Amino acid sequence: MKTLVIHPKDSSTDFLTPIYMNLKSFPDFDDVTIIRGGVTKAEVNQLIEKHDRIMMMGHGAPNGLFSVGQFQGSFGFIIDSTTVSLLQNKECIFIWCNADQFVNKHNLKGLYSGMFISEVSEAHYCGLPNTPQEIVNESNDFFAMEFGLVSDKPLNEIYDTVKYNYNVLAESNPVAEYNSNRLYLN
């Protein structure tokens, strides 16, 4: 399976790298392209056209995945409404805050997150005041590690496995509980 990972370089989302860092070692994933920046939006779009599975992650909003200044000519977003037609017939993974709104608005399919707490400030904003950094880190690291262990599997298997294991952590971690309740598959 030809897989494209789009993960704009940003130290605050580096915890997501375990999701895809071992993909090249899986037998069915011999063609993996990882893009963290340094190319144009047009080049990213060309890569999307050539790949079967598109994994998109980082900071985002209902309108798409932020480019965080890493992609030339992207004007704020590297994935947005102009990318939708390219994603319609792909196997997609959308991991960014409020990706659910983007997916639902554009009638896309895949595995995706809603609001996803990955920082202490987001925990406070989402109604989890006084959440310490350690709790956020534990949630972030566990989610990415669990996802990375099955990132070569079909989307339904990734979803079921990550959701089940993340829910175990959610019993003692309110951030994991919040995030797990906002992980979707359609």
Image (cartoon, rainbow, N blue to C red):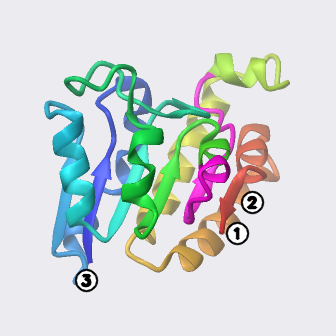
Q: Are marks 1 and 2 in contact (CB under 8 Å)?
A: yes
Which is in the foreground here, disc 3 or disc 1? 3
In the picture, the quarter occupied by the C terminus is: bottom right
**In the structure shown, which secondary structural element does the residue marked by tag 3 occupy?**
loop
Residues 52 and 49: in front is 49
Mark 3: amino acid = Asp
Q: Over which residues does the magenta segment extend?
A: 103-119
Residue at the spot of label 2? 167
Q: Tell me the amino acid under the disc marked 1.
A: Tyr
58 relative to 63 in the view: left or right: left
**Residue neighbourhood size for the residue with mark 3, other residues' Cα within 10 Å, grouped as few (<14), some (14–19), many (≥20):** few
* Badge 2 amino acid: Asn
Q: Mark 2 or mark 3: which comes first in sequence?
A: 3
Q: Is residue 12 left or right of residue 104?
A: left
Q: CA distance from mark 1 to mark 2?
A: 5 Å
Q: Which residue is mark 1?
A: 164
Q: CA distance from mark 3 to mark 1?
A: 24 Å
SS label for mark 2? helix
- The local crowd at label 1, few if under 14, some if 14 to 19, many if 20 or more residues have their Cα within 10 Å, is some
